[in-house]
Amino acid sequence: MVIRGFAHKFGDNINTDYIISGKYKFKTLDMDELAKHIMEDIYPDFYKKIKKGDFIVAGKNFGCGSSREQAPLVIKHAGIQGVISKSFARIFYRNAINNGLILIESNTDLIDDGDEIEVILEDGIIKNLTKKIEIKGNKIPEFLIEIIKEGGVINYLQKYGGFKIK
């Protein structure tokens, strides 16, 4: 699975309240409406800058804070196809994979805001097409890639009736 998009760069410790402000989390369950407020507290108008298929690129500890599923869902509904970060909060990682959002752990120092990147998901390879360099990320286990490809764990279970055991 090869995916391509542009990078939107953030720093360390981007918490779930930065991803979707608490002032919106309980007003609606409409994720498309919530997505209009993605990163609003730290990057006003961020939603207007996103093109479908773009990536969020961040430093350490992305998704720290509350364990609510709205954060990865908002990212996905905003059109972001994946997040590349040096590390992820564990509960965010689990919620994101369960909802079909691509997450890749990698050194992000060589990716800048606006860089075009290509990700070879099965190999954990990130190609910075702007800088013409290749970055090795952590390889995602095959069974998690299968869940992501199905759009999340619920879709996967509905399709297969359970987890495939090899």
Image: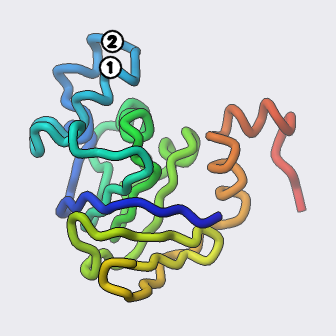
Quadrant the N terminus occupies: bottom right
Identify the mark at residue 28; answer none if there is no mark.
Answer: 2
Q: Residue at the location (68% across, 32% down)? A: 154
Q: Quadrant of residue 25?
A: top left
Marks 2,1: beta carbons within 8 A = yes
- Mark 2, mark 1: which one is toward the viewer? 1
Residue 162 image position (x, y, % from top left): 84, 39
Please indicate whether residue 134 sits to the left or right of residue 3 in the image: left
Q: Amino acid at mark 1?
A: Glu
Q: Secondary structure at mark 2?
A: loop
Quadrant the C terminus occupies: bottom right
**Residue 114 or 123: which is nearer the viewer?**
114
In the orientation shown, which residue stands out farthest toward the top? 27
**Residue 65 or 145: which is nearer the viewer?**
145
Residue at label 1?
33
Q: Residue at the location (33% across, 71% down)? A: 86
Q: Amino acid at mark 2?
A: Thr
